Image (cartoon, rainbow, N blue to C red):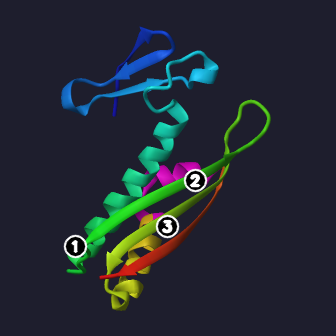
Amino acid sequence: MQITTSYQGNKRFHSGDGAASVTMDAAAASGGRGEAPTPKAMVLHGLAGCTGLDVATILEKKKVTWDRFDIDVAAEQTSTHPMVFKTIHITYRFVADEADRPHIERAIELSKNQFCGVSAMLAKSAQITHTLEIVPR
């Protein structure tokens, strides 16, 4: 895997090409414009995408259906530099049948323990926990 990231000025970076590209910005309080995610936020976006793809793929293979699937990720950082994530909490939210809870929990566990490389990397420095919320159809 290899990427190219280019400095755009004003504490903004652009990474990738075409439709597969992203822009990162510093927060306004740090001298950026705050118009794009920060690099650390992008790490959390990557975690959500990685585990989300795993869970969706596993559930599709099991023929489990849902009407909506959202992921919230909240992280707490250390207070000294380098400020790294020390805790991360993932909330998986489904609009689905409550009867599918065991299948969804199993998919989440498989993602956490076997498949999601982003989660595995972050778990080396942060405690990662999760909750599952199911809103009935």
Q: State the image coordinates of residue 111 (x, y, percent, origin top left).
A: 42, 65
* Label 2 crowd bin: few (<14), some (14–19), many (20+), radius 10 Å: few
Question: Alpha-carbon distance for marks 1 and 3?
Answer: 19 Å
111 up-or-down from 12: above or below: below
What is the number of the mark on residue 60?
1
User: What residue would you read off at disc 3?
Assistant: 113
Does 45 appear in magenta? Answer: no
Left or right position of 135 against 65: right
Residue extending furthest toward the top? 9
Q: Quadrant of residue 17?
A: top left
Comes first in the chain, label 2 or label 3:
2
Tell me what residue is drawn at x 43 percent, y 71 percent.
Answer: 108
Q: Is residue 122 left or right of residue 92?
A: right
Q: Which residue is mark 2?
A: 74
For the residue carrying disc 1, how many other residues have a C-alpha within 10 Å: few (<14), some (14-19), or many (20+)?
few
**Extreme residue toward the bottom, this view:** 99
Three-letter amino acid code at the position of disc 2: Ala
Mark 1 → mark 2, Cα distance in angstroms: 26 Å
Identify which amino acid the numbered label 1 is placed on: Glu
What amino acid type should be assigned to the residue bearing mark 3? Asn
Q: Earlier in the sequence, mark 1 or mark 3?
A: 1
Magenta part of the chain: 112-124
| Residue 135 percent coordinates (x, y) | 39, 79
Q: Secondary structure at mark 1?
A: helix
Which mark is first along the chain, 2 or 1?
Answer: 1
The tag on residue 90 is none
Q: CB of mark 1 within 8 Å of CB of mark 2?
A: no
The N terminus lies in quadrant: top left
